[in-house]
Image: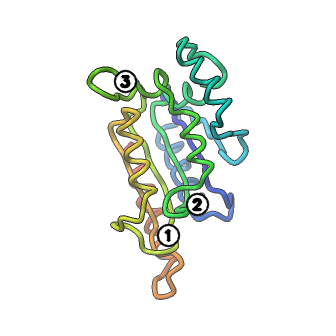
Amino acid sequence: MKKILVLDACVRREESRTKKMLDRALETLKEVHADWEFEVLTLMDLDLKYWNTESLKARDELLAKKAYDAPVFAYGRQFQQADGIIVAAPFWDLSVPAVLKVYIENVSADGVTFGCNEQGLYGLCKAQWMLFLTTRGGVWEGSDMEQGGSYMEALCQFFGIDTYYHIYADGLDMVDLDGKAILEAALDEVEHVCRGL
């Protein structure tokens, strides 16, 4: 049985247009792959904390002891063991919401999700693919200022995840564009991609 980790960073929850994309992805995947197990983390409901001086020192001491079974690495172990990862996060301050960045900070640990040797960094994650879903009010695709998609793609490389899918709905708030039609097209793409996973 494949385990799919779902990271919901749709801060506006049910009002989020990105959440509509996530819902379509899950509906499609559950229809096509009834034997898959889905672990959904609603990041806004987790007690995630960014590293500060004291907590980082404590974490580094555990890493030095290779105490990877410590509770502080639980999210990292879960991430590392997933067969596929879905991330849903709206475009936020040129990237992704802070809650997703803090989650990534929590899962990113040497010996858990990545390793390092004399040749450099290498990923330790089991996932074969990541699907990143996002919506944007303006038209940002292809802009150097759009950092969300490129950030998630770089993380795939960092964590050793070979295949990256990025589905976005751009220009949803542009008055001269049909936001409803754009979102519908993105939902269709979500379903198409998910049927091929």
Numbered mark located on residue 183 in the image: 1
Q: Secondary structure at mark 2?
A: helix
Q: Looking at the image, do the residues carrying marks 3 and 2 touch, with CB atoms under 8 Å apart?
A: no
> Dots 2 and 1: beta carbons under 8 Å?
yes
The amino acid marked with disc number 2 is Lys
**Which amino acid does the dot numbered 3 rest on?**
Cys
Between discs 3 and 2, the one toward the N terminus: 2
- Between disc 2 and disc 1, whose residue precedes? 2
The residue under the point 49% across, 58% down is: 95
Q: CA distance from mark 1 to mark 3?
A: 41 Å
The local crowd at label 3, few if under 14, some if 14 to 19, many if 20 or more residues have their Cα within 10 Å, is few
Identify the mark at residue 116; answer none if there is no mark. Answer: 3
For image coordinates 55% across by 47% down, the residue present is 26
Q: Of helix, strand and loop, which one carries label 3?
A: strand
Q: CA distance from mark 2 to mark 1?
A: 9 Å
Residue 189, image x, y percentages:
41, 60
In the rendered image, residue 145, in percent from the top left (x then y), is placed at 41, 65
- Name the residue at 54% across, 63% down: 93
Q: Which mark is residue 20?
A: 2
Give the left or right position of residue 41, taking residue 120 as reference: right
Which element is circle 1 on? helix
Against 65, residue 134 (above or below) is below
The answer to whether residue 40 of the structure is visible from this angle is yes
Residue toward you, 124 or 83 = 124
Residue drawn at (59%, 18%) of the image: 61
Circle nearer the viewer, 3 or 2: 3
Which of pointers 1 and 3 lies earlier in the amino acid sequence? 3
Check disc 1 and give the amino acid type: Leu
Q: Where does the C terminus fall, quadrant-wise?
A: top left
